Amino acid sequence: MKIITRFLLLLCIFINSLLLQAQINNGKDSGNTKAVAVKKTPAYVENGDLQFRWSPLGLINVFDLNLTLGAEYSYATNKSLILDAGYIMASIYGNVNDELQPATGYIVKAAHRWYYGTRRKPTFLETEAAFKNARYKSGNQWVGRGVVGGIPAFEELMQVTSRKDVFTFGVRMGKGFTFGATSPMGMEFWWGLGIRYRHYYPDLPDDAQILQNRGWFINPLDYDESWLPDLQVGMRLTLKAK
């Protein structure tokens, strides 16, 4: 786990270096000694700009119903750092009837973004790493006890609490829109690809286990630990404060 996390961090730094070098190369003279007048496109964000963000789709995410807010700070023209934080309130995870039940947890996201395009309709490229930790009350379940070699000696009806840790890393691009020429409010959409690590497990004594009937298909509500490709799409509302 530590080796993979370090690899992802190095990959993020490598991508950042490539994009920075490409930007420097684009600004160099290609060999023509004559100065060419170029009309400068107004930047979408300038040094010191601050935007607040809200992800409304979190309130309809039945897997992890959450309220997630964030801020974006521009440290240079068309470059910014982003931090989002969310609170998980409910989920269909952790209960046998797949009904929405109270849950607790948090979400933390950090990203770096580069803008290009017009001021009113900017396009952006970003890299993002995120971590989610959640806890679910699963209610009373029959649990195998006295497990030896994967075989339980007896079953016991007991209160079960489930936990989930999720780590994602992705590279994506998106498009932003403002609600008017001078409006501070806007909306953005994004899409991209990444990788996703998920560890979903019951909080049980060492000699206990819960048997799962996996069948022929992968059930996202089953306990497991896995690394999978991650298709990342979404939208959020923005408010420019400065």
Image: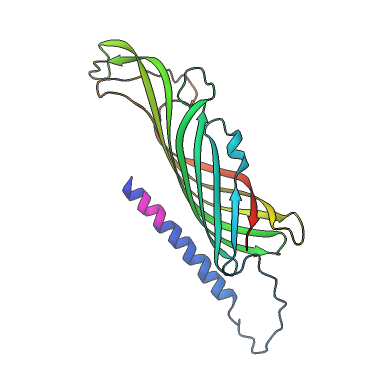
Query: x%, y% of residue 212?
Result: 40, 19
Q: Is residue 126 toward the left or the right of residue 204 in the image?
A: right
Look at the magenta stretch and give its main secondary structure: helix
Depth check, front residue: 190 or 36: 190
Of all residues, the one furthest to the top in this rendering is: 154
Q: Is residue 220 visible?
A: no
Q: Is residue 126 visible?
A: yes
Of all residues, the one furthest to the bottom in this rendering is: 33
Point 59% across, 77% down: residue: 27
Residue 7 belongs to the span the image colors magenta: yes
Point 54% across, 51% down: residue: 70
Quadrant holding the N terminus: top left
Query: x%, y% of residue 144?
Result: 31, 15
Quadrant holding the C terminus: bottom right
Query: x%, y% of residue 235?
Result: 63, 46
Residues rendered magenta in the picture:
5-9
The quadrant where residue 160 appears: top left
Of all residues, the one furthest to the front in this rendering is: 241
Point 22% across, 18% down: residue: 148
Query: x%, y% of residue 5?
Result: 37, 50
